[in-house]
Image (spheres, rainbow, N blue to C red):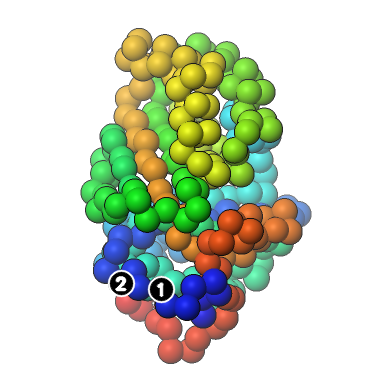
Amino acid sequence: MIIGYKKLTMNNIQCASMTFFKFDGILNQSWGLSKLLKLRFSIKKNKHVGFFKLLGAGSGLGYRAWPKYGVIGVFMVWDDIELAKDFFQSNQFVKLSGICSEQYTVFLEPTSSRGTWSGFGNWKIASSEKQNNGLVCALTRATIKRKYLLDFWKMVPSISKIQKDYPGLIFSQGIGEVPVLEQATFTIWENTQSMEEFAYTTFHGKAIQKVRQADGFKEQMFTRFNPVMSYGTWGGLNLLEKYGVPTLEPQVAETVPLVNTI
């Protein structure tokens, strides 16, 4: 059930989902990771999922090389938002989220993108005019060439300092597949202006431009999204509820097929 909109008519529109799990304690962390690794293999059998990444998290706002143990991210791209909703309301996901202390998922509609991630760039771009109260989400990722690692990470503390309490920032988390080398950041902003000011006019923008001009990235992708729905909480809060973004109500539907049976 969707809370917030009387009717949601987004069938056959490509949807991405960004999920963060928080696991408390070493045993829960190990158990949760093992379940997510199994999910990674079973999701390959789902013909409706075009892209999947299991991601570690960085400490602080995510810009540090030291990992944030207990936080794991999962990014998926679905053919249809209804299929994504079915998965997140399935027994399979409910059992998985039952292991963690918190999980938060944002359902995303791509509005612009450039570059690729592990060769993926097959986005079906939606109109950027259909935004929820002007909110915008951004996923930035890059593979850093080894000879530029030191220069890149020297700039990271300054970037993290600038972003903390930056006007218009709702949420930020650094993520990655391979520590130090494969880096990504997922952010949620109140408006495009705040995001672009941070991305292009602060030290962050100058630092990224410096590495880019030196050809320090192997592969890059920058994608903007409309947040169309959220599910769960982070820090005890549904971060997007006050902005009028619809909420997916937790429930288990026995008729919903599991991922590995689709």
Amino acid type, callout 2? Asn
Q: Residue at x 70, y 58 (%)?
A: 237
The residue shown at (37%, 55%) is: 130
Count of marks overlaid on the render: 2
Residue 253: image location, x then y, percent = 50, 86
User: Which is nearer the eye, 247 or 74?
Assistant: 247
Coordinates of residue 8 in the picture (x, y in percent): 41, 73
Q: Which of the pair 68/2 is nearer the observer? A: 2
Report which quarter residue 209 is drawn in. top left
Please name whichever residue, 124 or 212, is drawn nearer the observer in this view of the structure: 124
Q: Position of residue 220 (x, y in %)?
A: 34, 31
- Do we see residue 51 in this rendering? yes
Q: Residue at x 53, y 33 (%)?
A: 194
Picture quarter with the C terminus: bottom left
Q: Would you place residue 18 above or below residue 207 in this image? A: below
Residue named by callout 2: 11
Q: Position of residue 42 (x, y in %)?
A: 39, 66
Instruction: Classify residue 69 by image quadrant.
Output: top right
Q: Is residue 64 visible?
A: no
Q: Is residue 58 above or below residue 156?
A: below
- Left or right: 125 as drawn, with respect to 101: left
- In the figure, is residue 117 to the left or right of 97? left
- Residue 8 is tagged as 1
Hey, which residue is sitting farthest right in the picture? 25
Residue 99 vs 185, above or below: the answer is below
SS at circle 1: loop
